[in-house]
Image (cartoon, rainbow, N blue to C red):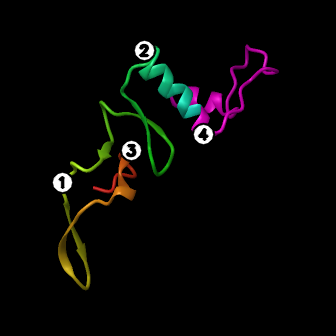
């Protein structure tokens, strides 16, 4: 799916195909195409998500997390304050791959 995402953005093109009509979409436009193919047309499985931080497409059945209003607070540590519970804010809501997950 990552390769298709890159293809839609013009970052990759199959060698055996003519590239004169290759797409050159923005990241948001490319993700919108994939999302519509998942949700509306049912062409792609609903398991693929885009990481809010690094923009990587990942398989949510195998990795990653979603942060939303139902996400439990997590324990965090600071040198000055010590241990505390971090309540996620609305600005942190979204899908995250394993490398970027804030929990």
Identify the disc placed on residue 3: none
Residue picked out by circle 2: 42
Identify the disc placed on residue 72: 1
- Secondary element under disc 4, as helix, strand or loop, is helix
Q: How crowded is mark 1: few (under 14 residues within 10 Å), some or many (20 or more)?
A: few
What are the residue bounds of the magenta stretch?
Answer: 1-29
Dot 1 or dot 3, earlier in sequence: 1
Dot 2 or dot 4, earlier in sequence: 4
State the residue at coordinates (22%, 50%).
71
Callouts 2 and 4 close, C-beta under 8 Å: no
Which residue is nearer to you in this view: 83 or 90? 90
Report the Cα–Cα distance between label 2 and label 4. 21 Å
Q: How crowded is mark 3: few (under 14 residues within 10 Å), some or many (20 or more)?
A: many
Which residue is nearer to you in this view: 95 or 36? 36
Magenta residue check for 94: no
Residue sitting at the far right = 20
Quarter where residue 16 is shown: top right
Report the Cα–Cα distance between label 2 and label 3. 23 Å
Residue 36 x %, y % = 49, 24
Vertical comparison of 23 with 49: above or below: above
Dot 2 or dot 3, earlier in sequence: 2
Residue 32 in the figure: left or right of residue 81 = right
Callouts 4 and 3 close, C-beta under 8 Å: no
Residue picked out by circle 3: 97
Residue picked out by circle 4: 27
Dot 1 or dot 2, earlier in sequence: 2
Of badges 1 and 3, the one in the foreground is 1
Residue 103 x %, y % = 27, 55
């Amino acid at each position: 799916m990552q390769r298709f995402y890159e293809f839609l953005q013009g970052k990759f093109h199959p060698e055996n195909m003519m590239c004169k009509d290759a797409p050159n979409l923005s990241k948001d436009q490319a993700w919108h195409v994939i999302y519509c193919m998942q949700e509306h047309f049912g062409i792609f499985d609903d398991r693929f998500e885009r990481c809010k931080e690094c923009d990587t497409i990942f398989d949510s059945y195998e990795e990653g997390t979603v942060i939303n209003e139902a996400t439990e607070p997590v324990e965090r540590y600071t040198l000055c304050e010590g241990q505390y519970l971090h309540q996620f804010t609305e600005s942190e809501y979204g899908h995250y791959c394993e490398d970027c997950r804030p929990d």
